[in-house]
Amino acid sequence: MARGSAQELTHTGSRRSGPRRWLRAARWLVSAGIHPRANATTLRVAEDLAKRMDYSTGHVLYCLEGTCARLELSRATVKRHIAVLRELGALVWAVHGTRTNIRRTRGLGGYAGTATVYAAAIPPSYDHAMGHEIVGSGYDARIVVHPSSQSSQSSQGSQSSQQSSQPSASGQIAGAGEPPSLTLVEEKGKAEMTGGLKYTPRLRASRGKTRTSKSPSRSKSQDPAGRDARTARRSPAQVAREILQTRTVRALVNWTQREPLRKLAFSLRAYFDRGLSAHEIAAELIGLCLTWRPSRPAAYIQAHLRREARETVARDSAQAAAGDPRSNAAWQEWLAQASTESPARTDTDRRLARLYSWDQWSEVAEHYAEDPDDALDLYGTRLCVHAVRQAALAER
C-alpha cells in the first residue's frame, strides 16, 4: 500500500500511464483483492476519471462536486474511493488544491482557487504480475517492449502469403501495389516508429496552387494586452514550450477543448508573460466560465484579457489621482505576501480541533480520506481511527 509521501508524484514508486492502459490496470488491481475496500464503486470512480484524463500526460482534475453529481454518490464515498486508488498506487497527487484566492494576489476580481490535479500511475505490483520489464524507477519508469515474437509471427505470415500468391508480372516494380508500412523497433518510453511511408504522392507534391488565407497577417495583429505582436515575438523553443503547456491547459479546462492548439496557445500569451504555469492558467480560465461554454474560446480569452488590461489601467490611474495608498507598489507586495502565507499550526489549534470535533465523525473521516497526514496531525491517531470506524458503521 502507498502511504504518505508515496502518494506524491515526486516520491511514488508507480510509473506514469495514459488513461486506456491505466484503466486496464485499475480493473486488475480491484479484482486482485489487493485492497480490502476496493470494489465496484472504486471502478466506477476510476472510469469517470479515465474519461476526463489527458491522453498525453495522464493528468485529470479532481472535480469532486462534478464526480458526485455524475455518479450519484456522496462526497464521503467519492473521497474514500479516491483514497483507495491512491493507496493502491494507481493515483498520485500532481497538484494539491487550496482555497487561497489566487486572483486576489494579482489584484484581480472574482474568485479562483487552485484545483486538485491527480496523475494516473501503474504500481509495480501490476507490472510484476504481468511480467513486464521496466527501465528506470518511480514515476519516470518505462516499460520495455520486445518485438521478437511479433516479428516472428509477421515473417511466418509473409512466407505463407508469398507461397499462396501468384508471381508478379515481368517489369513490374517490386512492392508498387503494397500499402505503406511501418517498422516496429524496441521501445523505451513512448512508441517509436521508423521507416515511415515508402512513397510520396507525386500528384499532391506537384500541385502549383498556393494557399491563400483570409485571416490578417500575424505581424499586423495585436496580442491581448494591446501591444503590437511584432514587439512580442517568440523564439521557436519558447513557442514549443507554450504549446506543450497549452496542451495541459486544454485538457484541464473543458470549454477550451474545441479550439485548435496553436490558436489557443496564441491567445494565452499574456498569461505566459506573467510567468503562470499551466495549472495556474487552468485555474484562471475555470473561474471565467462556470455555467456556459463560449463558442469561440480563443476570441473570448483575448477579449477578457483586453478588458482586464483596460480595467487595471483605469483603476491604477484613479487610485493615483486620489492618493490611494493601495497604489503604492510596496503596499501591494505586502498584501500579496500576507494573503498567500498561512499561519503555522500550533498546539492550541490541535487542542481546539480535538475538543470541538469529538462527535463530528463524518467531518473528521472526510478530512482523513482527503489528506490523511494533515488529519492525523490535527486530530491525532485515536480520534481519526474512531471517526473512520464510526463513518463506516453509519454507511452500513
Image (cartoon, rainbow, N blue to C red):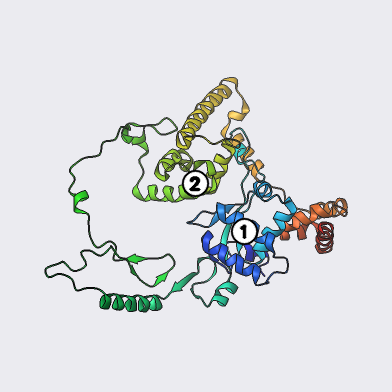
Q: Which of 25 and 83 is in front in this view?
A: 25
The residue lying furthest to the top in this view is: 321
Q: Can residue 275 be seen in this view?
A: yes
Q: How far apart are marks 1 and 2 (CA)?
A: 21 Å
Occupied quadrant, residue 81: bottom right
The picture places residue 320, in percent across and down from the top left corner, at 56, 24
Q: Nearer the viewer, residue 363 or 30?
A: 30
In percent of the image, x 55 and y 63: which residue is there?
Answer: 22
The residue lying furthest to the left in this view is: 171
Occupied quadrant, residue 25: bottom right
In percent of the image, x 51 and y 34: which residue is there?
Answer: 294
How many numbered marks have been drawn onto this rendered protein structure? 2
* 392 w.r.t. 323: above or below: below
Left or right? Give the position of 250 relative to 173.
Answer: right
- Amino acid type at circle 1 is Ala
The picture places residue 197, in percent across and down from the top left corner, at 27, 61
In percent of the image, x 56 and y 25: which residue is there?
Answer: 315
In percent of the image, x 50 and y 69: which residue is there?
Answer: 141
Residue that numbered label 1 is attached to: 46
The picture places residue 354, in percent across and down from the top left corner, at 85, 55
Q: Which of marks 1 and 2 is nearer the N terminus?
A: 1
Occupied quadrant, residue 160: bottom left
Question: Label 2 neighbourhood size at 10 Å, few (<14), some (14-19), many (20+)?
Answer: many
Give the quadrant of the N terminus: bottom right
Left or right? Give the position of 289 relative to 41.
Answer: left
Helix, strand or loop status at disc 1: helix
The picture places residue 205, in percent across and down from the top left corner, at 20, 50
Residue that numbered label 2 is attached to: 250
Q: Can residue 94 be seen in this view?
A: no
Give the quadrant of the C terminus: bottom right
